[in-house]
Amino acid sequence: MSLLSLLVALIIVCLIFWACRAILAAFGIGDPIATIIYVFLVILVVFWLIGALGGGSFGTLGSIRLR
């Protein structure tokens, strides 16, 4: 994974968090449930990053290369 791909992935992750926050606010979902959803999203992103960095067998996205 190149540095540019990592930047694009970061923008997409931020967009997902923004959309999640907007949808939760639009439906009036309370803070305890919203917190559980945010924690779940953070765990997914951390697992994806671990897989992208090549540690463990969480994903097959390759590894980050600095050229």
Image: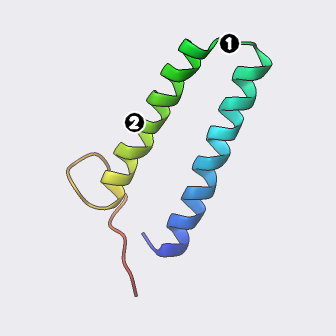
Q: Position of residue 29 (x, y in %)?
A: 68, 12
Is residue 8 or residue 28 the one in the foreground? 28
Quarter residue 47 falls in? top left
Q: On the picture, is 37 further left or further right than 22?
A: left
Query: Can residue 22 be seen in the rendering of this structure?
Result: yes
Quarter residue 33 falls in? top right
Q: Position of residue 38 (x, y in %)?
A: 52, 29
Using the image, determine if residue 25 lies above or below residue 1: above
- Mark 2 touching mark 1, by CB under 8 A? no
CA separation in Å, label 2 and label 1: 20 Å
Query: Can residue 60 be seen in the rendering of this structure?
Result: no
Using the image, determine if residue 23 lies above or below residue 46: above
Q: Residues within 10 Å of mark 2 (few under 14, many from 20)?
A: few
Label number found at residue 43: 2
Q: Amino acid at mark 2?
A: Ile
Q: Residue at x 56, y 57 (%)?
A: 10
Q: Which residue is mark 1?
A: 29
Q: On the picture, is 24 further left or further right than 9?
A: right
Quarter of the picture holding the N terminus: bottom left
In terms of secondary structure, where does tag 1 sit? loop
Quarter residue 62 falls in? bottom left
In terms of secondary structure, where does tag 2 sit? helix
Q: Residues within 10 Å of mark 1 (few under 14, many from 20)?
A: few
Quarter of the picture holding the C terminus: bottom left
